[in-house]
Image (cartoon, helix red, strand yellow):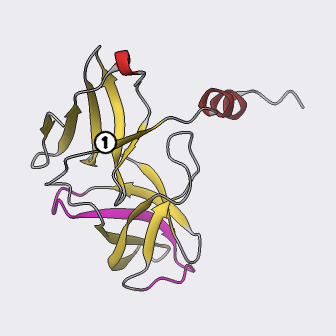
Amino acid sequence: MINNVYNKTNNHITIDKGHNDSLEPDMGVITSKGIVGIINKTSGKYARIQSLLNTKSQINAQLKKSKHFGFLTWNTQNPHVVQLTEIPKLAPIAIGDTIITGGNSAIFPKGILVGRVANYTLENNDSYTVDVRLFNDMTNLSHVFVIKNKNKKEIIQLQSSDDAE
């Protein structure tokens, strides 16, 4: 890890591996404790990761027990807490529930740890916004792992194909 910015609104992490090491944009980044972010730029020897602590991040995640899903965002208030938005009002939810990646993208497989429900509020009487305390300490990262989905091109091609029916 070369650099980890976590105190701005659009934070990034720089690592000392790049496209010479087969890294490319839209690869997921995790630690043994959970999700970190997504590679958004590479050079020969380096890669920049758009951190979870970035207001432009929107990652599919779900409640582990009920499987209701939404999107991880960050409101810039606390580097240890992100928000899971658009959870349906009928979803059973409790403080301490585990949040995992939802697997509804070609970047992260289903089941990567994110964090635990710290609090939740009903928005507009139809969906919850959930405060998720991250398993990772995003202010103190050292080693990360990059996920390469070998089926990514096929998934994207299928999802973007026009139905002629």
Residue at left offset 29%, top offset 35%? 49
User: Is residue 86 part of the magenta span, yes or no?
Assistant: yes
| Horizontal side of residue 95 vs 64, given as left or right | left
Residue 41 versus residue 69 in the image, above or below: above
Q: Amino acid at mark 1?
A: Lys
Q: Residue 29, position in %: x, y? A: 37, 43
What residue did someone put label 1 on?
A: 56
Residue 151 versus residue 42 in the image, above or below: below
Q: Residue 122, position in %: x, y? A: 40, 78
User: Is residue 30 part of the magenta span, yes or no?
Assistant: no
Q: Magenta segment range?
A: 75-94
Q: Nearer the viewer, residue 112 or 78?
A: 112
Q: Secondary structure at mark 1?
A: loop
Residue 89 versus residue 80 in the image, above or below: below
Q: Nearer the viewer, residue 34 or 105?
A: 34
Q: Nearer the viewer, residue 118 or 152?
A: 152
